[in-house]
Image (tube, helix red, strand yellow):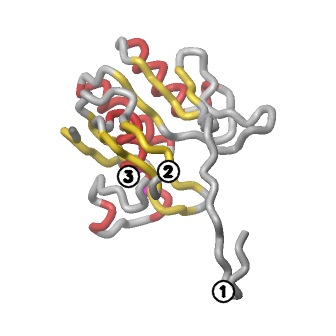
Amino acid sequence: KLIGARYFNKGYASVAGKLNSSFDTPRDKEGHGTHTLSTAGGNMVPRASVFGFGKGTAKGGSPRARVAAYKVCWPLVSGNDCFDADILAAFDVAIQDGVDVLSVSLGGDPTAFFNDSVAIGSFHAIKHGIVVVCSAGNSGPADGTVSNIAPWQITVGASTMDREFRSVVVLGNNMHY
């Protein structure tokens, strides 16, 4: 399933200073990359559930896809964790690698296209026939909180589920809620 992984940290290093060897890896240390890759290309998993709730078959958007990871975000430094130089370098390499689709789970506050590295990188990808799907961000649902708003991107927001997972919480004093 995962056929390649690359990392980009020169922009980050220009602010953070000399990096130790723990930064020379595309390894996902917080789970965000693993989560987004399985959302995009996860295989069919029958009888999936969350603690017995929501039973069914789980799958990613394209279960037969082969996926590659391009890591551009690192621990916070000077108020930033994903630097434009690294984002644009990853787009360039993904284009060179010949990907068919880019699923980009990066975002921030909406900004002018010429200052937005995701918009710039995705524009170049589109020019090479690569579909770019972006996350809408995590700031909603208030008005004007969506990110990745360039018209050449497909921007996808999270939704709610059509069911409830009711449970009982038992406190230490044996009260039930």
Q: Nearer the viewer, residue 173 or 33?
A: 173
> Does 167 sit above or below residue 159?
below
The numbered disc on residue 53 is 2
What residue did someone put label 1 on? 172
User: Which residue type does callout 3 highlight?
Assistant: Asn
Of the numbered discs 3 and 1, the one sitting upstream in the chain is 3
Task: Give the extent of the magenta segment.
Answer: 9-13
Q: Position of residue 83 (x, y in %)?
A: 50, 47
63 sits left or right of 79 in the view = left
* Real-space CA distance between mark 2 and mark 1, rounded to the nearest whole angstrom: 24 Å
Residue 110, magenta (yes or no): no
* Residue 146 position by quadrant: top right
Q: Nearer the viewer, residue 57 or 31?
A: 57
| Circle 2: element type | strand
* Real-space CA distance between mark 3 and mark 1, rounded to the nearest whole angstrom: 47 Å
Q: Quadrant of the N terminus?
A: top left
3 sits left or right of 123 in the view = left
The numbered disc on residue 9 is 3
Q: Nearer the viewer, residue 4 or 90?
A: 4
